[in-house]
Image (cartoon, coloured by chain):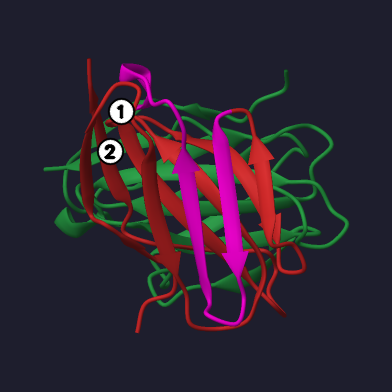
Chain colours: A red, B green
Amino acid sequence: SQQGEEDPQALSIQEGENATMNCSYKTSINNLQWYRQNSGRGLVHLILIRSNEREKHSGRLRVTLDTSKKSSSLLITASRAADTASYFCATVLTDSWGKFQFGAGTQVVVTP
Amino acid sequence: EPEVTQTPSHQVTQMGQEVILRCVPISNHLYFYWYRQILGQKVEFLVSFYNNEISEKSEIFDDQFSVERPDGSNFTLKIRSTKLEDSAMYFCASRKGGGSYNEQFFGPGTRLTVL
């Protein structure tokens, strides 16, 4: 079984619409972090949510975490063409040295 | 703003050759990581490094791989005898100490192509 699985795998929306993607995981975590990756490029940190937090905001981003359901969601409001990228959730397990387990990602395409 | 840097950005090598991928983590960070991403697949953990030794490694990180922090600045990943399936994007990451409640900063990656 895989830790940190995102859905949907792909999302295509118009500029101005909201984009929502989900991440599920299987084991206990310390925190969950969302990253963005533009095609062929590095990983850019978006937001970190701790296991004792339920919701967090950063600009146009809103992240929720439901530890009872072992799931998280990332909402991008008022999307822009520049938001086109792949989005990954990464979980940090308890009793780990902070290593990440990444999901397969959600590929978001925002068309003008 | 401090950032993790990696060199080279792209490395092409012949199967069986040794490669060394270099990373300069953020200067006050204490934990260092290597990940890889095969084209079209998820990012996979390879190894974590703390206090000058490997703290954790994945099953991918076999005897062909080694890591080193030779001078307190650079953090290197060596692949002793590359295989075709080692072709991937390799990311270095670092984070501050103080528990795992903090973000990892990723470098831009090195694209390794094994021919």
Residue A73: x and y in percent read: 48, 57
Q: Is residue B114 above or below residue B97?
A: above
Q: Is residue A99 above or below residue A80?
A: below
| Horizontal relation, residue B12 to residue B74: left or right | left
Residue A107: x and y in percent read: 26, 43
> Residue, x 79% and y 42% (percent of image)?
B29
> Residue, x 48% and y 49% (percent of image)?
A74
Q: Is residue A61 magenta?
A: yes
Q: Which residue is mark 2?
A: A108
Q: Which residues are magenta?
A: A60-84
The chain carrying label 2 is A
Residue A76: x and y in percent read: 46, 36
Disc 1 crowd, CA 10 A, few/some/many (<14, 14-19, 20+): many
Q: Which residue is mark 1?
A: A84
- Looking at the picture, which amino acid does disc 2 mark? Val
- Looking at the picture, which amino acid does disc 1 mark? Thr
> Residue, x 42% and y 50% (percent of image)?
A88
Q: Quadrant of the N terminus of chain B?
A: top right
